[in-house]
Image: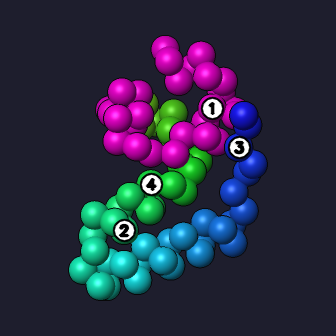
Amino acid sequence: MKQKKMTEREKADIAMKAFALEDEGKKEEADRLLKTIPIPAYLVKILKEQFGIDYLISGGYNLSEAEAEFGQEWLAS
């Protein structure tokens, strides 16, 4: 099932919740929440070259924008 594109407002709301969690000393929970924000496709391309796609996938980062732009096959290669 295709995910709907996250709006800038949704991204900002998630970030604000994560910052509040961090202020409460809940760093790991904040980090998990921040990883739900899609990384822009152009940044995923750079990060894939620098760290490898396995690092991004195993790290739990949201790669949905890169998948939408480059395709599932690109993520696997």
Do the residues under discs 1 and 2 have CB atoms within 8 angstroms? no
Q: Nearer the viewer, residue 44 or 28?
A: 28
Which residue, given by chain and number where applicable, does mark 4 sit on?
35
Residue kind at label 4, given as amino acid type: Lys
Residue kind at label 1, given as amino acid type: Glu
Q: CA distance from mark 4 to mark 3?
A: 15 Å
Which residue, given by chain and number where applicable, does mark 3 sit on?
3
Labels 1 and 4: the sequence-earlier one: 4
Do the residues under discs 4 and 3 have CB atoms within 8 angstroms? no
Labels 2 and 4: the sequence-earlier one: 2
Labels 1 and 3: the sequence-earlier one: 3
Label at residue 67: 1
Nearer the camera: disc 1 or disc 2: 2
Q: Callout 2: few (<14), some (14-19), or many (20+) C-alpha neighbours within 10 Å? A: many
Q: Nearer the viewer, residue 9 or 32?
A: 32
Magenta span has 16? no
Image-based side of 66 in relation to 26, left or right: right
Q: CA distance from mark 1 to mark 4?
A: 16 Å
Looking at the image, can residue 66 be seen?
Answer: yes
Which element is circle 2 on? helix
The image quarter containing residue 74 is: top right
Which residue, given by chain and number where applicable, does mark 2 sit on?
30
**Residue at figure coordinates x 35%, y 35% from the top left:** 58
Q: CA distance from mark 2 to mark 4?
A: 9 Å
Please report the bounds of the magenta region as a residue range.
49-77
**Residue at figure coordinates x 44%, y 54% from the top left:** 35
Residue kind at label 2, given as amino acid type: Ala
Q: CA distance from mark 2 to mark 3?
A: 22 Å
Image-based side of 77 in relation to 69, left or right: left
Do the residues under discs 1 and 4 have CB atoms within 8 angstroms? no
Nearer the camera: disc 1 or disc 3: 3
